[in-house]
Amino acid sequence: NITLNPDTAQPRLIISADRRSVMQGATKQNQQKRPERFDPWPCVLGCEGFESGRWCWEVEVAYGSCWAMGVALESVTRKGPNDMSPEGGIWAVGRYKDKFLALTSPSPSPVLQSTVPRQVRICLDRAGGQVMFVDVDSEATIFTFPQAMFGRERIHP
């Protein structure tokens, strides 16, 4: 289970009391300004940071036509414009209206998936430099970022 870090949550994001789920609100929450908080992008990081090993966790998408999930370097840009791709320190897949995409560079890549998954397993292999996304229901691989360059930096869900 991933615990979300409310100190990193963009002000429109509403974190559940148990810090296991997030949804976007219509207005900004009254939150203390912090350097680690994302703004303006609606992002939040997990509390856990991974420096080594292999890790997998599952994310359920309740509803919504605009979302993304994945991992980010601890040093990811949190203020102003952000390159939502590996070059910007983010390895993610997402849904934008009727498109399901891998957030690649220089532009997002369409994911060949017959349906948008309702539950996704994210697998991080630090030593192998790989981030893989799997549809939990079908066990089909959605997308794999091979040869990811993490350096020695901590990575957060």
Image (cartoon, rainbow, N blue to C red):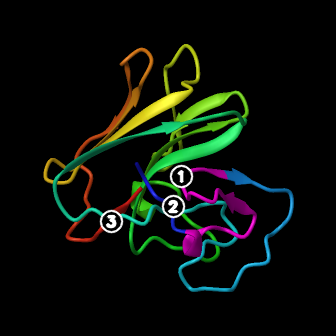
Looking at the picture, does residue 134 appear above or below residue 151? above
Q: Is residue 52 left or right of residue 116?
A: left
Of residues 117 and 87, the one nearer the viewer is 117
Cα distance between the residues tagged 3 and 2:
11 Å
Of residues 63 and 42, the one nearer the viewer is 63
Q: Is residue 154 magenta?
A: no
Q: Please tell me whether mark 1 sits on a helix, a strand or a loop.
A: loop
Of residues 125 and 1, the one nearer the viewer is 1
Looking at the picture, does residue 81 appear above or below residue 102? below
Query: What amino acid is labelled 1 in the image?
Result: Arg
For the C terminus, the quadrant is: bottom left
Which of the 4 quarters of the picture holds residue 141? top left
Residue drawn at (45%, 70%) of the image: 76
Please report contact status of discs 2 and 1: CB closer than 8 Å, yes or no.
yes
Residue on which the image places disc 3: 49
Q: Earlier in the sequence, mark 2 or mark 1?
A: 2
State the image coordinates of residue 112 (x, y, percent, origin top left).
49, 20
Mark 3 surroundings within 10 Å by alpha-carbon count, few (fewer than 14), some (14 through 19), many (20 or more): some
Which of the 4 quarters of the picture holds residue 123? top left
Front position among marks 3 and 2:
2
Image disc number at residue 4: 2
Cα distance between the residues tagged 2 and 1:
6 Å
Q: Which residues are magenta?
A: 6-22
Cα distance between the residues tagged 3 and 1:
16 Å
In the orientation shown, which residue stands out farthest toward the left?
A: 127
Query: What amino acid is labelled 2 in the image?
Result: Leu
